[in-house]
């Protein structure tokens, strides 16, 4: 199977060096930028993860790890931390301090590798304390991840290490035992009575210990917290109306929320005490596009916000993540399921790929960790990591000669090509020996797609064009490579099916009355070269109620399935009197 990123958490050995107090260089000046929505910074110029927000006066600071791997890396590369700053997350106005804290500059005891998820808070003394897990130089420790603390009198540094050693390391938790969980994902909560707690957790166990008033030393016993159903990592505690809340990465492989063990959802629990026991309250965010989510919840400007990360930025990946922020809505004392937002909502992105609109099935899917839906999730991944693949592995002894994958649509589609990516691993996964494509015509019979040859190279994007056909379904059948009595398994990370471009994109006329949302048609007729006209599903942008709150006219854009050249437009007339609702279609716009 492909390697897991987590294996990169085990790094090279190095020697333990003396630890002088280091003072980091002055932070680099912040760069202003304008955010159009999530991810906060989505252009791929800087990847950020593990957001930890802090509200101070009129500013919201988001402390974040920095993902630095090249596009095709399969594991974490993280050495420093940045800080995003805004007054109002919905303003779109942000500043970014890159490299605010460089792990090996600040911590003499750290290698500077694996600068994972940290958390900064303001102490009662007015200083800022940033707790970060980094790899220590302690070559003898069974796991070298340790939590350090850096302090500054400014929320954006410069930072220094006040104790010259880890605040918490493997031995503090597990003594001489070689069994335990990585000491990562610190989170610090200061209660109203002045007590301060350090939380951390990974690989299924969440722990807590009290800190003394210096915020830089432990006080009391380390405890394992109970009641956190399917806890994986990333504990985040806050208090609201006297109740303690704990949000975390929730993981149960094979579940509805996390079909494979490589994914996480966000759950929360509540308690009457900051150390639990906790009462599980439910899932509030199903997984994002990244394998980890790392939630944090904070009040700022009278509103509540959740931060997390995705791989939705340009050229993003599971190890090139980007921080996102959305508003949290409350239902009394319960957190409502979070509505994830995007600057560029996936459902409205123009594409000629019809696969995301299809119902997908297969003769067989290995699961977990492979996922059938990896085929048409719209994300050909740079990183070959389950669950971003469909695969038919059954064990080396029982692999089938062939398996198929299939897309079906509710309406006939005009298709003219496919794109696909096969993979190979050091074990039993190989590209297919051969494959074929068939389509089901509107009449119900399966017919071969005529192509000269179908490519099979692994680990690169392959495209195949053919004479357009009108289909209700398409099927690809893969034949495994024979070895001995068996066949190698095949794995596919994405399978795209391309529409022929329509000759025209129509403009729709729609009438409505004040206070009534316009009824936008579910399909529009598109005409294709050769003259065939097909009803094509349209995903319309949402229409804010202000638009039809008074008489007037406005337009609404819609994405027609498989059409990448532009949006279909609805011209809506909103009238004061109540007319009979109607819609008509006039092909007055031509596709470029
Ligand atoms: O960023 C590295 C690790 O990934 C964090 O420590 C975890 O919370 C996960 O987000």
Image (tube, helix red, strand yellow):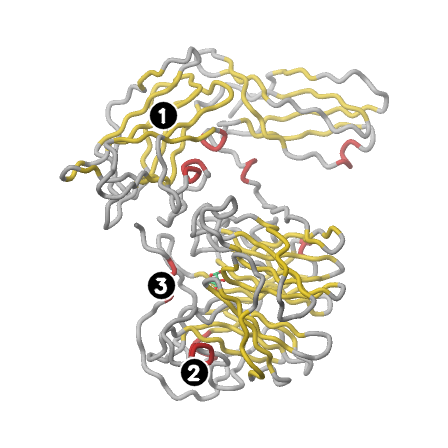
Q: Quadrant of residue 400?
A: top left
Give percent across and percent down for residue 565: 50, 29
Ranked by sequence position, the earlier of labels 2 and 3 is 3
Distance CA(mark 1)–CA(mark 3): 38 Å
The spot of residue 463 in percent (x, y) is 33, 32
User: Camera-side residue: 98 or 363?
Assistant: 363
Q: Which residue is mark 3?
A: 8
| 190 relative position to 315: left or right | right
Q: Which of the numbered marks, if any, corresponds to residue 475?
A: 1
Ligand 1 under 8 Å from disc 2 Cβ: no
Image depth: mark 2 or mark 1 in front: 1
Residue at 78%, 37% in the rendered image: 546
Q: Which residue is mark 2?
A: 108
Instruction: Give the crowd class for mark 1: few <14, some 14-19, many >=20 residues within 10 Å.
Output: many
Q: Circle 2 — which element? A: loop
Q: Earlier in the sequence, mark 1 or mark 3?
A: 3
Secondary element type, mark 1: strand
How many other residues sit within 10 Å of disc 2, few (<14), some (14-19) or many (≥20)? many
Q: Position of residue 490 (x, y in %)?
A: 28, 38
Pick the residue in front: 146 or 50: 146
């Amino acid at each position: 199977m492909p390697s897991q990123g987590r294996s990169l958490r085990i790094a090279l050995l190095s020697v333990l060096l003396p630890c002088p107090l280091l003072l980091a260089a002055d932070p680099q000046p912040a760069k202003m930028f304008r955010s159009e929505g999530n991810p906060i910074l989505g252009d791929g110029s800087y990847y950020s993860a593990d957001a930890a927000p802090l509200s101070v006066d009129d500013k919201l600071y988001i402390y974040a790890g920095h993902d630095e791997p090249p596009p095709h890396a399969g594991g974490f590369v993280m050495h420093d931390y940045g800080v995003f700053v805004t007054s109002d997350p919905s303003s779109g106005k942000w500043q970014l301090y890159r490299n605010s804290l460089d792990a090996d500059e600040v911590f003499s005891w750290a290698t500077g590798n694996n600068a994972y998820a940290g958390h900064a808070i303001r102490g009662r003394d007015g200083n800022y304390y940033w707790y970060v897990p980094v790899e220590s130089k302690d070559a003898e420790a069974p796991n070298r991840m340790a939590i350090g603390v850096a302090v500054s009198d400014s929320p954006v540094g410069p930072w220094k290490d006040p104790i010259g050693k880890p605040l918490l390391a493997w031995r503090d938790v597990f003594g001489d035992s070689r069994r335990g969980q990585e000491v990562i994902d610190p989170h610090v909560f200061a209660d109203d009575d002045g007590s301060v707690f350090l939380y951390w957790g990974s690989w299924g166990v969440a722990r807590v210990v009290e800190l003394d008033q210096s915020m830089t030393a432990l006080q009391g016993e380390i405890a394992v917290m109970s009641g956190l159903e399917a806890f994986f990592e990333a504990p985040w505690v806050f208090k609201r109306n006297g109740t303690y809340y704990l949000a975390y990465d929730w993981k149960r492989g094979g579940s509805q929320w996390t079909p494979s063990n490589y994914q996480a959802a966000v759950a929360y629990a509540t308690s009457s005490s900051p150390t639990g026991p906790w009462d599980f309250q439910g899932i509030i965010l199903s997984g994002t596009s990244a394998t980890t989510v790392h939630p944090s919840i904070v009040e700022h400007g009278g509103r509540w916000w959740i931060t997390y990360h995705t791989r939705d930025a340009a050229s993003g990946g599971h190890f090139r993540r980007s921080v996102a922020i959305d508003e949290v809505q409350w239902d009394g004392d319960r957190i409502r399921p979070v509505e994830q937002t995007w600057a560029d909502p996936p459902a409205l992105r123009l594409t000629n790929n019809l696969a995301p609109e299809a119902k997908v099935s297969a003769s067989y899917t290995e699961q977990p960790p492979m996922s059938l839906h990896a085929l048409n999730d719209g994300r050909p991944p740079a990183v070959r990591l389950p669950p971003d693949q469909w695969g038919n592995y059954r064990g080396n002894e029982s692999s089938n000669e062939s398996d198929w994958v299939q897309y079906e649509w509710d309406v006939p589609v005009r298709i003219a090509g496919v794109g696909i990516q096969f993979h190979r691993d050091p074990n039993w996964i190989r590209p297919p020996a051969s494959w074929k494509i068939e389509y089901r015509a509107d009449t119900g019979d399966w017919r071969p797609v005529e192509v000269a040859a179908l490519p099979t190279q692994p680990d690169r994007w392959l495209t195949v064009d053919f004479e357009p056909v009108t289909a209700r379904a398409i099927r690809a059948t893969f034949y495994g490579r024979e070895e001995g009595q068996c066949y190698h398994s095949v794995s596919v990370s994405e399978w795209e099916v391309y529409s022929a471009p329509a000759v025209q994109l129509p403009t729709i006329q729609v009438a409505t009355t004040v206070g009534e949302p316009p009824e936008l048609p579910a399909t529009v007729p598109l005409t294709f070269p050769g003259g065939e006209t097909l009803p094509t599903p349209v995903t319309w942008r949402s229409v804010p109620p202000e638009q039809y709150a008074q008489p007037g006219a406005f337009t609404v854009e819609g994405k027609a399935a498989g059409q990448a050249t532009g949006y279909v437009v609805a011209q809506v007339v909103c009238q004061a009197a109540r007319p009979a609702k109607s819609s008509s279609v006039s092909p007055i716009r031509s596709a470029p």
